Image: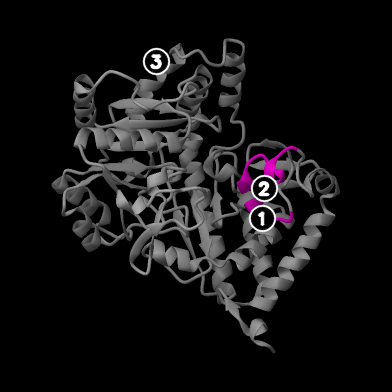
Amino acid sequence: MNASTRAIQGGIEAARIARLRESEAVAFLKARPKSQARIGNGAAGFFGGVPMHWMNDWPTPFPIMVDRAKGAAITDIDDNRLDDFCLGDTGSMFGHSPPPVARALRRQAGRGLTYMLPSEDALAIGPLLREIFSLPHWQIATTATDANRFALRVARAVTGRDKILVFNGCYHGAVDETMVRLKDGRPINRPGLAGEFRDLTARTKIVEFNDVTALEAALADKDVACVITEPVLTNSCMVLPEPGFHAALRDLTRKAGTLLLIDETHTISTGLGGYSRACGLEPDLFVLGKPVAGGVPASIWGMSEETASRYAAYNRAKQPGYSGMGTTLSANPLQFAAMRATLEEVMTEANYAHMENLARRLDAGLSTAIDRHRLPWHVARVGARVEFICAPGPLRNGGEADAAHVPELEAAVHVALVNRGALIAPFHNMMLVSPATTRRQVDWLVSAFDNVLDQLA
């Protein structure tokens, strides 16, 4: 047995992983002759053969060509039906085309799509945002990236400071200044950035999640305008906060005169109002994108009373002119209609209870399969969001999360699950349970996962 065969990845021999990936790729291609003919060699007219480059990052031989999606399932053009636990990486967390949202879109489509003015739906949304997310002042944007950018501008404006602080392993969309990482304890620009000409670490501090001592030291100079964080690190292998971390984070930011921005774009899976409401967090700024309008591109960002008052004072004193915040298509009536339907009829306590119950069942089933095969893996969960991680846990910070990734193994498992009728997120083994997800679908995913582990272990 040569060295490459003996190599172990996530407790599995590399040769076994390679064999599984090869055989599952063959099965994937055999089941999709129409898709292969249409997109197997790339779609004409698109750079890289796809409309957005990350469509090529899926580990399948080529992107799945979707014909339709409904509830918690998608069907490709070869009529392969997949139980969907990816759900657009949270964009369709409440299922594909929730009926209230679909009805709202049809109603609004005949009344105009954008006109830079409010509607009756917009007036209904403001009180709903206050009630659900517990902050008094809100604005609408198109993506969480935009919302985070605008919220950080407000933080800089009201504090008079230009630096921000992030946690290693963070992800906040395409916000440039959050694209930093720790390497051997030193801050660097995140590897792989295209065309970035600045040293982002000049205005961004970075420490490890859950490291209260490092956080206190980084805030000591009182030059940080804002700490931006998810309450749980999610866009790597999932990292949960240790007991007392969020209390310390809030205490230290207040002592330093630093604002706290909580980005709940993924952790909205926790429950109604997100992790912040469930755990009593008190952010100065709050951002939520992706699922807030049921899959229609939209996001929200909110401010505490004090932050809004300081921002209003700043606006009264600043020079007149464009703030650099806002885009023409933000806060359009299509977003208002979809968001109102989502907040009133989809993002409900009853739906969250269904999601939580099935996510707990999924967590237990995956954990049992891992234990049965005696693998050094673990499962992490925040509400309806579940991940299997091919390393021991729990993980404490972003550095550990990065080291826990096993790309070849994860890719092999992903394609094998697709061939067994289950789709999970391609980038971090994430699975979401929606209001439309059934117990049968959860049990089938657990069974498929167990079968894949049989092939590997």
Residue type at mark 2: give it: Asp
Camera sees residue 270: no
Residue on which disc 1 sits: 444
Which is nearer the N-term, disc 1 or disc 2? Answer: 2
Q: Position of residue 444 (x, y in %)?
A: 66, 55
Q: Foreground residue, 445 or 3?
A: 3
Mark 2 or mark 3: which comes first in sequence?
2
Q: Secondary structure at mark 1?
A: helix
Q: Residues within 10 Å of mark 3 (few under 14, many from 20)?
A: few
Q: Amino acid at mark 3?
A: Leu
> Magenta includes 330?
no
Q: Name the foreground residue: 22 vs 365.
A: 22
In three-dimensional space, the C-alpha distance between marks 2 and 3, rounded to whole angstroms, equals 37 Å
Query: Which residue position is annotated with label 2?
Result: 83
Quarter of the image for residue 108 reads top right
Percent x, y of residue 415: 69, 59
Amino acid at dot 1: Trp
Q: Whole-percent x and y of residue 64?
A: 72, 47
Contact flag, marks 1 and 2 (Cβ < 8 Å): yes
Real-space Cα separation, disc 1 to disc 2, in angstroms: 9 Å
Mark toward the viewer: 1 or 2: 2
Quadrant where the N terminus sits is bottom right
Determine the image quadrant of residue 102. top right
Magenta stretch bounds: 45-61
Q: Residues within 10 Å of mark 2 (few under 14, many from 20)?
A: many
When the figure is inspected, residue 346 is found, relative to residue 78, above or below; the finding is: above
Give the residue at mark 3: 123
433 sits to left or right of 220: right
- Residue closest to the eye, 319 or 52: 319
Residue found at the far front of this picture: 197
Q: Foreground mark, 1 or 3?
A: 3
Which structural element holds mark 2?
A: strand
